[in-house]
Image (cartoon, rainbow, N blue to C red):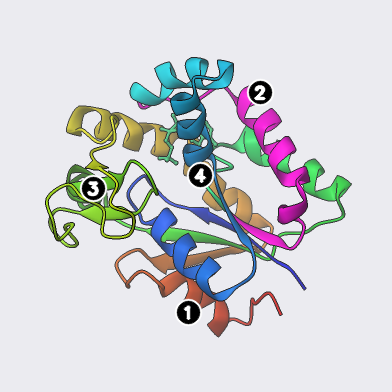
Amino acid sequence: MAMRIILIGPPGAGKGTQAASIIEKHPIIHISTGDILRENVRAGTELGQTAKRFMNAGQLVPDHLIIAMMRDRLAEDDAQNGFILDGFPRNVQQADALAPLLDDMSLRLDAVVLLEISDEAVVRRLEGRRVCSSCGMIYNVYSHPPKADDTCEACGGQVVRRADDQESVIRGRLDVYHKETAPLVEYYERSGLLHRVPADGGPDSALKYLESIGVSGK
Ligand code: AMP
């Protein structure tokens, strides 16, 4: 049985980090809409050029673009054995669009994991967050700095601050989260899929939790 998970949480809750520890143990793929969009920005595609304005302002990229992007991504072969969605759905309209996409492919979700964290902890984490511009490895100047200044330990790439990780933009992204994304908590609670996991329990707390409740790809 394939494992199909959604990770929800404010920016900086550690969705990418938790997803990385899940895919280390399970043969499923990690689909991060933020990563796909950043790749498009780097490659200068039409989608990237449109998305960039919204991303740098901390706003959501329009739903129709995101939904079309996800329809294509979920139809690819490597998604058929299971996935973790990180950063999608981001609002109720996107969740409403995801449901028929999955139905059409006769797929169902196993769990929606909410990573819980306070706004103040988010601001501190994101101000300290750095990412490798080549491989995407995540660092934090407070809790996990790269050993050599600005150089990625995994690939030697340059470790940088994301354009949207500055305090004014972070506060805006938190507002967007509370207004747009937080309603998904109740949405998935109603379908009995929601599970709450504290965001400060270590990089594999979501994996451990999922295994403890018997959600596994096997
Ligand atoms: P993330 O890496 O998930 O923090 O996403 C970075 C930025 O990409 C967000 O602030 C949005 O501008 C955009 N983005 C990522 N996922 C979505 C989505 N599902 N819907 C709309 N915008 C998104």
Query: In this view of the protein, which residue sits in the foreground, 20 or 201?
Result: 20
Label 4 beta carbon less than 8 Å to ligand 1: yes
Q: Which residues make up the magenta segment?
A: 58-84
Q: For the residue marked with disc 4, what is the amino acid? A: Gly
Q: Is residue 13 visible?
A: yes
**Label 4 vs label 3: CA separation?**
17 Å
Q: Which residue is mark 1?
A: 208
Q: For the residue marked with disc 2, what is the amino acid? A: His
Mark positioned earlier in the residue sequence (3 or 1) = 3
Up-down relation of residue 127 to residue 143 (above or below): above
Q: Which residue is mark 3?
A: 129
Disc 1 is placed on an element classified as helix
Up-down relation of residue 163 to residue 73 (above or below): above
Mark positioned earlier in the residue sequence (4 or 3) = 4
Quadrant (top left/top right/bottom left/bottom right) for the C terminus: bottom right
**Label 3 vs label 1: CA separation?**
24 Å
**Label 4 vs label 2: CA separation?**
15 Å
* Circles 4 and 2: CB atoms closer than 8 Å: no
State the residue at coordinates (66%, 23%).
64
Of marks 3 and 2, the one in the foreground: 3
**Label 3 vs label 2: CA separation?**
30 Å
Residue 87 is labelled as 4
Disc 3 is placed on an element classified as strand
Q: Give residue 93's quadrant in the image.
A: top right
Q: Which residue is mark 2?
A: 64
Up-down relation of residue 26 to residue 70 (above or below): below
* Circles 2 and 1: CB atoms closer than 8 Å: no
